Amino acid sequence: MYKVTCLLRLGEPTDEMTTDITVKRITAAAEAAGVRQPLVARTLPGVRNGGDLLAHFRFASKSDWLSHRNAVDEAMAAPAIEHIDSVEYTGDGRSGRRRSPGPTTVYRTLLLRVDDAASPAEIARFEHATLQMPQHIPAIRAWQLSRVDRAAGTAQWTHVWEQEFTDLDGLLGPYMNHPVHWALVDQWFDPECPQQIVKDRICHSFCAIPAPVIDPTPESGSAAEEG
């Protein structure tokens, strides 16, 4: 599976009608490209550099995406759209899991750039630490950490960290405030820590979802095999 995530910032002023038209235009282009259940939704209050709209598409393969990219890009070239941060990546489930059962109502994505000078060992430790969070935060119902194939926008993003949550409180409360977050993972982001390897600003974005977005390997047992 090949995945594309775009964070769209709208220009000012943009009224409700214009926003609705933009959402419908991008959704229609994705459906015409063969995307099943494309996600194009307004972001929720509290995003950071997360845009006004979040678009997430799943294609059968990279070649499938490349054959339809122009049509989707054209739809996103609407006058109302001022800026786009985007990532393209393989969603193969090797670093993703889903708890079962349990509802999910919020999709969150984090775009980040790891320093070019970071060693492979440092990157591996950062990835491993990130994938520990779901073991300790049950509000995360599904997750996937992926390396980016192609990025555009404010930075050359290297990673995308996706999660689904039971509800918005699960994201803004247990996830953001959990000790494993600020004690284990934040060191890689904090410029005052010697372990910092994440550079530039990050894009922290989330929206409501009507159905699951992440389709990783189901979790076996009560604890994740990976993170």
Image: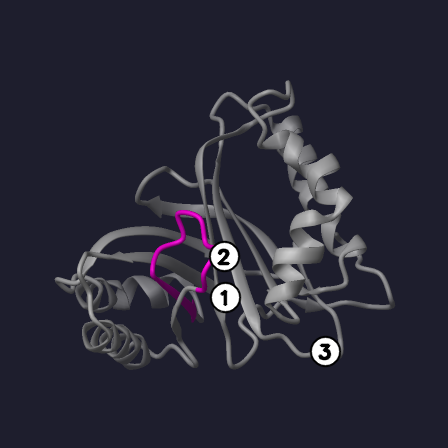
Residue marked by disc 1: 1
The residue that appears at 36% across and 58% down in the rendered structure is: 6
Relative depth, front residue between 67 and 208:
208
Camera sees residue 143: no
Residue lying furthest left: 79
Residue 102's label in the rendered image is 3
- Whether 53 is among the magenta residues is yes
Q: In this figure, which colouring scheme has been used for the structure?
A: one colour
Q: For the residues labelled 1 and 3, say whether their Cβ atoms are less than 8 Å apart.
A: no
Residue 223 horizontal side relative to residue 99, left or right: right
Residue lying furthest right: 222
- Whether 122 is among the magenta residues is no
Please tell me which of labels 2 and 1 falls first in the chain. Answer: 1
Please tell me which of labels 3 and 2 falls first in the chain. Answer: 2
Q: For the residues labelled 2 and 1, say whether their Cβ atoms are less than 8 Å apart.
A: yes
Real-space CA distance between mark 1 and mark 3, rounded to the nearest whole angstrom: 23 Å
Q: Secondary structure at mark 3?
A: loop
Residue 226 horizontal side relative to residue 190, left or right: right
The span picked out in magenta is 44-58
Residue marked by disc 2: 90
Q: Assign the magenta stretch its main secondary structure.
A: loop
The residue that appears at 82% across and 68% down in the rendered structure is: 220
The amino acid type found where label 2 is placed reads: Thr
Q: Position of residue 158 (x, y in %)?
A: 47, 40
Q: Position of residue 43 (x, y in %)?
A: 41, 64
Residue 23 horizontal side relative to residue 150, left or right: left
Please tell me which of labels 1 and 3 falls first in the chain. Answer: 1
Residue 144's label in the rendered image is none
Real-space CA distance between mark 3 and mark 2, rounded to the nearest whole angstrom: 25 Å
Real-space CA distance between mark 2 and mark 1, rounded to the nearest whole angstrom: 6 Å
Q: Secondary structure at mark 2?
A: strand
Instruction: State which quadrant residue 169 falls in.
Output: bottom right
